[in-house]
Structures are given as structure tokens and as C-alpha cells.
């Protein structure tokens, strides 16, 4: 009988040790550092109290890039035009209509932007972006993409689409970014949440920047062009 009790106790001791080892293994597995690519995406549509022709004129003649980039947690360092094309074939009075703010011309432009990153966790100071803008009488589309990784920032993309909506302008902006992180497996979801929050903040910043930029110039009688860095 004593031998049986001893064997019985040894069994549960062994079982307890196995359980502890198993739990310890799970903890170690969850605490092990992994490389993870976290993604954040956000889209927002809003209306600006400005008719589309006026909005289009402001966007073409005034430089909104620095203001919008600044509200996205970055600072514009350099802006260079790589290519530009103007099609006036659909406009019988291009100069007069341009002065009146009723241009029917189509404009396409490609810019190369260099911006400073203000987030030290990205382990990069600067990011190069390629911006493609297509501006037509009834719509504006701007796509801005990173030309390559910068530190832990694998990719960054923003888009802007604007179109007339009665006497106002409807604008849709999107932000997408991917960040390479090294975190314990237990905190992967937290890393995803942080990158998603960065996308949310960037969208909020862009929306506010756009509103303030249009308000700044909407009441000007004559929208004069501003010359940026070429």
C-alpha cells in the first residue's frame, strides 16, 4: 500500500512538473521576439464649403503640399517637378477661362517630394515620395506613394479625390502604411493597433489641413499662383 501511495504521489508530481514546463513553454513562445509587418489603412469623405471650380483653382495655383504633409506628422524638405503636361484642346478660351476660374483645360503633373519623418521609432529621418496629380474640369485625383522603404517604414501611400457636389466640393482622402516591427508575439496585435492609429491620425490631420487651406484662400478675389521649389 505505501508503494502504491508513493507511486500515486510521484505521478501527480510528474504531472505538475509537466504542466509547469508546458505553461513555461507557452510563456516563452509568446514572449519571443518576432518580426512583424503591421498595416494601417483609413479612408475619409467630407464636404468643403467651396464650389469645385474655386477649389480646383486654389489647388492648381496654391501649393497645398506643405500644409497637408505638415498635418500628417511630416515636414516638407524639398519639392521638385519631374514632369508636367497641359491639355487645352477642350477649352476654346484657355487664358480667359483660367482668369475667370472656369478653366476646361486638363493638367497632369508628377512631383518628387522629400519629407522629414518625426517619429523616431521608424529609425529613419527622411522619406521620398512620388506624387502624381491629374486635374480635369470635373475631378481631381492625386496619388502620393513612397519610392521605397525608409527605416522601418516599408510603404506609405495617400490619395485624394475631389469632385463637385452641387455648390460644394466632395473630397475623399485615404492613407495606407506598413511598418516593420520587432515585438514579442504577445504584442503583435498591439503593434497593429498602433500603426492603425497612425493612419487614423494622418487622415484626421489631412482633413483638417485641407479645410484650413481652402478657408485661407477661398475669399481671395484673385487666386494668384505660388511658385514652389522646382
Image: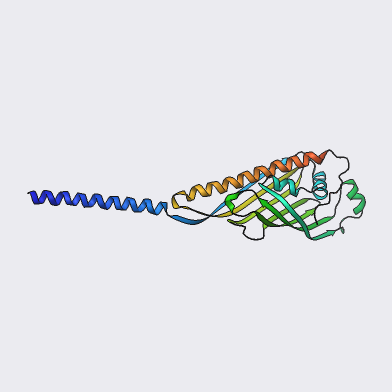
Residue 136's spot in the image, x, y percent? Answer: 80, 53
Left or right, 131 with respect to 222, comes to: left
Task: Look at the picture and state if 180 lies above or below 48.
Answer: below
Residue 15's spot in the image, x, y percent? Answer: 23, 51
Q: Is residue 166 visible?
A: no
Residue positioned most to the left: 1
Q: Residue at x 57, y 54 (%)?
A: 179
Quarter where residue 178 is shown = bottom right
Q: Residue at x 63, y 54 (%)?
A: 156
Q: Residue at x 88, y 50 (%)?
A: 98
Left or right, 126 with respect to 95, comes to: left
Name the one closer to the observer, 169 or 197.
197
Q: Residue at x 29, y 50 (%)?
A: 20
Q: Is residue 10 visible?
A: yes
Left or right, 181 with respect to 221, comes to: left
Residue 47's spot in the image, x, y percent? Answer: 72, 41
Amino acid at each position: 500500500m505505501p508503494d502504491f501511495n508513493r507511486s500515486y504521489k510521484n505521478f501527480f508530481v510528474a504531472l505538475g512538473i509537466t504542466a509547469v514546463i508546458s505553461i513555461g513553454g507557452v510563456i516563452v513562445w509568446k514572449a519571443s521576439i518576432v518580426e512583424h509587418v503591421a498595416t494601417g489603412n483609413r479612408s475619409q469623405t467630407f464636404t468643403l464649403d467651396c464650389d469645385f471650380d474655386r477649389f480646383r483653382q486654389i489647388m492648381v495655383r496654391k501649393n497645398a503640399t506643405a500644409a497637408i504633409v505638415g498635418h500628417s506628422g511630416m515636414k516638407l524638405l524639398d519639392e521638385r517637378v519631374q514632369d508636367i503636361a497641359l491639355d487645352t484642346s477642350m477649352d476654346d478660351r484657355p487664358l480667359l477661362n483660367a482668369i475667370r476660374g472656369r478653366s476646361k483645360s486638363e493638367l497632369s503633373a508628377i512631383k518628387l517630394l522629400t519629407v522629414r519623418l518625426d517619429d523616431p521609432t521608424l529609425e529613419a529621418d527622411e522619406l521620398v515620395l512620388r506624387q502624381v496629380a491629374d486635374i480635369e474640369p470635373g475631378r481631381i485625383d492625386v496619388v502620393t506613394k513612397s519610392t521605397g522603404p525608409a527605416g522601418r517604414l516599408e510603404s506609405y501611400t495617400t490619395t485624394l479625390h475631389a469632385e463637385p457636389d452641387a455648390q460644394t466640393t466632395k473630397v475623399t482622402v485615404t492613407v495606407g502604411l506598413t511598418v516593420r516591427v520587432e515585438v514579442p508575439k504577445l504584442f503583435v496585435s498591439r503593434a497593429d493597433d498602433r500603426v492603425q492609429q497612425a493612419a487614423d491620425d494622418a487622415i484626421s490631420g489631412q482633413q483638417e489641413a485641407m479645410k484650413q487651406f481652402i478657408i485661407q484662400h477661398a475669399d481671395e478675389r484673385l487666386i494668384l499662383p505660388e511658385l514652389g521649389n522646382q
